[in-house]
Image (cartoon, helix red, strand yellow):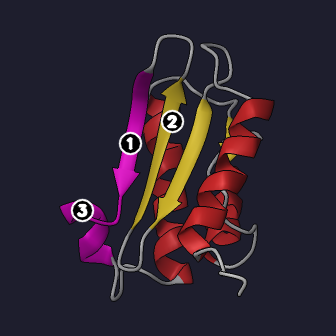
Amino acid sequence: MVSKKSRSEIRRKKHMKLRNRFSGTAERPRLAVFRSNNHMYAQIIDDTVGNTLVAASTLQKDVKAELEKTNNVEAAACLGKVIAEKAKEKGITEVVFDRGGFIYQGKIKALADAAREAGLNF
């Protein structure tokens, strides 16, 4: 009998494969995205020293106040705009996009597109 691996386990393996290919540096940090069933999280990380430079999520009061739901495409687009604005305040314009093993469509794509429109380059 063949046992089927869980989606989360498959995503975790994909993410580790992606992480072997690139990492964030001081000049070009990594924009890491995670989405749960209820919320989305984005952070900009410098992997050389292991620091989170900027973080945003749909749990934050200012972001949550603008949204009707915290787990749809509109919420992802809003989060992308917020993380890009925070990054620009810190002087970060170039990043490496880490989709976290998720497929690049829907919420992940909306977040990436909104971050690009708000001024991040990747």
Q: Which mark is residue 89?
A: none
Among the 4 quarters of the image, the one containing residue 106:
bottom right
Q: Residue at x 45, y 25 (%)?
A: 90
Residue segment shown in magenta: 51-66
Give the image location of residue 23, x and y in percent: 68, 26
Q: Is residue 100 visible?
A: no
Q: Is residue 86 left or right of residue 84?
A: left
Name the spot of residue 114 as percent of width and height, x first. Answer: 63, 62
Q: Which residue is mark 1?
A: 55
Give me the C-alpha separation between circle 2 and circle 3. Answer: 19 Å
- The residue that mark 2 highlights is 44
Depth check, mark 3 against mark 1: the one in front is 1
Indicate the quadrant where residue 61 lies. bottom left
Quadrant of the image containing the C terminus: top right
Marks 2/1: CA–CA distance: 6 Å
Helix, strand or loop at label 2? It is strand
Residue in the foreground of this view, choosing between 23 and 31: 23
